[in-house]
Each structure stands twice: as structure tokens, then as C-alpha cells.
Image (cartoon, rainbow, N blue to C red):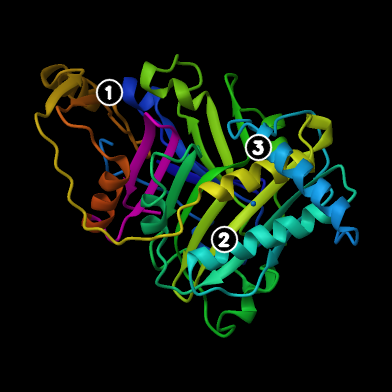
Amino acid sequence: MQARIQHDRLCVLEAPGLGPAAQRRPRPLLLGRRSLNTYGNFASANRIHIAASKLIHISNPVSRTNCEAKADSEVKEMDINEVFIGLGDAETPVKICQTHTLPAALTVAEAVRKLKSAIADLKSCPPALESGILRFQVPLPQDVKALDWLRCQGQSSRLFPRCYFSPKSSHGHIDESKTNGLNKHMNQRNKNILKGVAGIGSAVLFKSLNRFSANDWKAIRRFLSVDSPLIRVYGSIRFNSEAEPSLEWSGFSFFYFVVPQIELDEFDRCSFLAATIAWDNSLSWTLKNSLNKLELSLQQVSCEIKKTGNRLHVAGIKKDHLPDEPTWEAAIQEFSKAANSSFRKVVLARRTQLRTETEVDSLELLACLQEKDQDFFQFYLEVDASTSFIGSTEQL
């Protein structure tokens, strides 16, 4: 799988491959505006190999009560499944793209309270802007781990999609001068290493049944800024847009990218619980819509983090290979005879379907992969309660 920077803006991971598995599955992507120092080695990747066959004080008390009751009613009427789709014809960046760092908290529960207070303040005095994206983040102790937090956001929560990404410990450092207050909570003389990002819900979602185009990239890019490098887009895109997707990949459309609504960013010196809101009146999604949805989402966040062991028990595994092994071996032999020095890298892929008698917890599987492959990159994208994309990556 190859990685390259296009137009100094887009980190694209792509893997040329032969066979149905390589043609139909999405590839993981992390998008973000960047300067030379924003992501350091993390963004200037050369290649990646998949090692898995697999966010008004009212003086009159009576008026205050009426306004609060109306606001509560609006929030309750909001469908948490409503989604802001950010694709459109807009060419210019959103009117505001900012990160606001709130006072530090000792627990996730305290951090959630601070985020709720910040959102309430913003609702009482909203900016008169037709579009924007705002991130509010609360520093937490560094022992609050992203994957532990994500695993505690149980299936009872209706917040989808869910995503996770972990770079190697030697990569992922960011330019602290671009983080709007992060240096108040970190040692400015040393790099703060990104260790993991977990997200739930979507502040803005980009997906389509059509092929990914330059206009789609422009629609994504307008929500990103070098001044807020922690506002990032996570997702996947198909290897081969010419091939029809197999059934299990249908939920990912031709491409699927998300700015998480609520996320926990784990660094080696501290962690951050963040909430992001995005809006664009021209796309029929207002700031009021975004704030109401975020309030609903924050009510569902689990504040208790339990560190559980990784015990993945799978019974009755049945395997189906396509093509079968003899056919695959024959294809390799045939290609080897025709191959020449013009090929830099070839991926000869095949599809393996595993059927189990017991349900597999996808996050538990991810945790086991991380424990086993501690020097690898891991990624996870769950679009609904029954569809997830998991990978463990060796090189970047």
C-alpha cells in the first residue's frame, strides 16, 4: 500500500492489488490540512502495509424558565440519527475554524461537564456566522486511554460512526504552536506524541455512492485548517471505484469520511476529551442543529472507564477462501512469469471469510491486535452496529 501527499494537503493511502479483496475493500485515510511541521513524520509517510488478511444570561426568572423549557423541547425532538452531510458546491472555507481549550479536568465525568457548560454558553450567545467548525477540548491525565474509553461506549449508545486510529509511538507529533492553548498543558520543549484517537458520532460526514472527486476533496478541505490541526477527518475510500462493492462493504459507500463529534485524543503527556460542532446554512444544517445534536450526544457518553483484559474467545471458526488455495497459487505462478522490473510492488490478494458460532466483539479484537502488534498502527471504523472495518498496519 502506497502513501503520498497530493497538493500538500491530502494524505492518501492506496494499495494496488489483484483479486476481489483488493478491488472491493476500502482503504484507510486520515485527512487534514498541514504545514511542514503540523504532523511531522506522521503525514510525510512513504508507504503503509496492511498486516491483516484483514463537539445569555436572562435576568427575568420566568423568561429564563420558558426559554430553557423551549430549548429542552427542541433538543428532545432532535433525532440523534440526523447527520450533517458536508458535500456540496461550496468552494470557500467555512467562516470560522477554531479550537478552544478549556480548563483541565481530572476525570472524564468532569470533562463532560465542562464541555456541556461550554456548549450551553455558546447556545446563549451564538456567533452570527453562516458556516463554521468549532472544537472544544478538555485536557485530562495521560493515563486516560483512547481505546479504553471507546470500549466503554457500549452498544446501548446510538452514536455512530465510531473510529479509532493509533500511530506508532515514534510518529504523530504535532506543532504545538498550532494548537491554540495546548502548550499551556504540555512541556513546550518536548514533542507531545500522539498515541491514539477514538471518536464517536459525526460533527460532519462525507460519503457518497459516486466516485471520490476533486470537488469532494474541496468540500472536505473547507472544514480543515492548519490553525486547528486536531480537527481531522478519518475514513476510507475504495481501492477500485470501477468494481461493484461486495455486500459487506456496502455501508461504506464509495468513500466514507468523518470529523468525529466527540473524541478522546491520547498523547504521551496528557489526553483530551473533545467535542466538535460543524454547520453550514447553505447545506441546510444550522449551528442550532449542530448544538442540539451535540447536547443529545453528550448525554450518552459513558464517563466510567474500566480497564478490562483482552480475552477474545471465538468458537467454531469456519473459513471460506476466494479464490481457493490451488487457484491462488496458480495465479501467483502465472503472474510471476509475466512480471518485470517495471513493477515496484504487487499485492496478490484473496478473500477469506470467517464464520463463527459466537459473536465477535470488534473492539475486543482490535485491542488484541494492539496488544499483539505493539509496534504496528491500528485503525477501526464502525459505521453501524453490525459493520466495522479493522486493520493492523506494520509500516508507515
Cα distance between the residues tagged 2 and 3: 19 Å
Q: Main secondary structure of the magenta part?
A: strand
In the image, residue 172 lies at what x, y percent?
A: 49, 63
Residue labelled with disc 3: 76
Determine whether 389 is above or below 35 in the image. above
In the image, residue 90 lies at what x, y percent?
A: 81, 33
Q: Label 2 amino acid?
A: Val
For residue 226, say whether it is visible. no
- Decide: marks 3, 1 in contact (CB < 8 A)? no
- Decide: marks 2, 1 in contact (CB < 8 A)? no
Instruction: Locate the N terminus and report the quarter of the image it occupies.
Output: top left
Residue closest to the eye, 365 or 48: 365
Determine whether 94 is above or below 184 in the image. above
Disc sitting over residue 338 in the figure: 1
What residue range appears in magenta?
373-396
Give the class, few, some or many, for how many residues have Cα within 10 Å of label 2's Cα (few <14, many ≥20).
many
Q: Which is in the foreground here, disc 3 or disc 1?
A: 3
> Mark 3 or mark 2, which is nearer the start of the sequence?
3
Q: In the structure shown, which secondary structural element does the residue marked by tag 3 occupy? A: helix
In the image, residue 204 lies at what x, y percent?
A: 65, 39
Cα distance between the residues tagged 3 and 1: 63 Å
Residue closest to the eye, 54 or 123: 123
For residue 334, say whether it is visible. yes
Q: Label 1 amino acid?
A: Ala
Give the class, few, some or many, for how many residues have Cα within 10 Å of label 1's Cα (few <14, many ≥20).
few
What is the residue that sits farthest to the top in this orientation?
Answer: 244
Q: Is residue 393 left or right of residue 287?
A: left
Residue labelled with disc 2: 112
Q: Quadrant of residue 320?
A: top left
Q: Which is in the foreground here, disc 2 or disc 3?
A: 3
Cα distance between the residues tagged 2 and 1: 59 Å
